[in-house]
Each structure stands twice: as C-alpha cells, then as structure tokens.
Image (tube, rainbow, N blue to C red):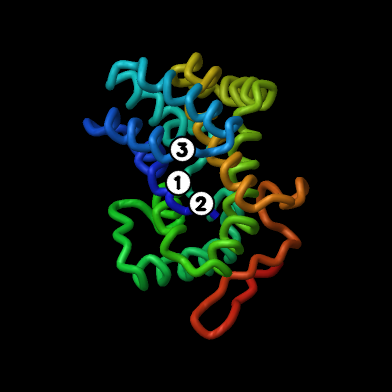
Amino acid sequence: MHTDRYPGLAPLLRYPRSGFALALRDATAALRDAPARCAQDFAQGAQALAALAPTAREELFLKTFELQAICSLEIGYTRFGEDYKRGLFLAGLKQEHQRVEHDCGDELPDHLGNVLELLPLLDEALRRDLAEQVLIPALRAMLADFDEARLRARLDALKARGELVMQEALHFSNPYRWLLHALLCLLEADYPDVPARRSGRAAENFIPIHDRSGAVELGA
C-alpha cells in the first residue's frame, strides 16, 4: 500500500483555511506517481477548488458536508449509522490514534481526515481491515449520495417538507465528488477486489477490528 499518499489528502477534506493552496500543492505532489485514472480524478477536483474564491470554497465545504449535507465525513456513521457498532468502532479507533500519539483535533476519530493521517501509522493487518471493511464501503456510499437522481430526489423531499434548500446549485458538479473519487480509486488500487456489494451501511457484515491481543468482531 502506498501509505504516503493518504495523509496529503487529509487537509483537503477539512474546512478550508488559509493554507489550502499549499495543502493542494502538497497533495498534488503526493499523487505524482499514482495511477493515471486516480490522478485525473484528483486534478479535476483540485483545479475546480483552486479556482474558487476562499469564501466560495468555504461555502461549498459547509454545503457539502455540514449544512443540509450531501454526505458525512465521519466514516463510522456512514458505515454503521447510529448502530452500536459505530460506538465500538470509534472506541477502537480512538485507542489507535492515542497509541501512535495522533492528535484528532476538534474532529472525531472516524473523521475521514483523521483516518487518512492514521493509515500509515497502523500495522498492515489493521490497515487492510480498515481499508477493505470500512473505508472503501464508506466512500462508495458517500459517492452514491452525489448521484444526480438521488440529489434531485433529496432536494424534492426537503422542499416537500417545507424546508428552504440552501444554495441548491452547489449540489451539482461538486468538486469534492472528484476528490472522493480519487481517494476511492487509490484505495481500490491498493486493495483490489473488495466486492461491489460491500458498500453503504454494514448490516449482516462482520467488521474485524484488531486490538492488541487479537481481533474484535463488530458483527450484525
């Protein structure tokens, strides 16, 4: 696994601050040797984000991930919903962050940015479990939420409930979709053959999360 690529993407999946241009440049450099299709997806999103004024970029991030969000950056929620398994997953991840002295800041341990920074610091067995059982399925589910038909149905449902749709145009042609595409592409290149049916929220799946003494199964 090319673990050095993933931390560079983490700042781009957090609220864009003054150092965004530098983070974009560093991420581009980290993906220099990535598979062409992954680099192309990343470039499409990166160029669109770079072209935005800082305030517009901030608004886009909030609209995409926080205010009437298209999807959540908390991969545990995306994968497990409110099920007890998310609590177990969060507890295990928190221990791993603490073990390697990784600071999660104000975000939860399962925030995508934190998980990307954690990946290179894990042993390969846990890294594979996290990628195949949680990250790849969660990203597939997140990207499914960007499907235009699904977006339009969601907007119609909001309007039917009498809710004011905030910045409706920001739902479509969203640059963050391409960053998530690039990330999924990298993970699938490093960990191929994860079944297509493994996406969305875990129901009857068993999610092995290793601890120091063996493995804990977050089962259905």
Type of the residue with mark 1: Arg
Marks 1 and 3: in contact by CB < 8 Å?
Answer: yes
Q: Quadrant of the N terminus?
A: bottom right
Q: Judging from the image, what secondary structure is the residue with disc 3 in?
A: loop
The residue lying toward the viewer, choosing from 135 and 149, is 135
The residue identified by callout 3 is 31
**Residue at position x 59%, y 39% from top?**
142
Relative horizontal placement of residue 169, taking residue 49 as reference (left or right): right
Q: Which residue is mark 2?
A: 2
Residue name at image x 38 percent, y 65 percent = 97
Q: Which x, y percent locates residue 5?
A: 45, 46
Alpha carbons under labels 1 and 2: distance apart:
6 Å
Secondary structure state at the residue bearing disc 1: helix
Toward which corner of the image does residue 98 lie, by quadrant?
bottom left
Residue at position x 41%, y 63% from top? 121
The residue singled out by tag 1 in the image is 5
Q: Are marks 1 and 2 in contact (CB under 8 Å)?
A: yes
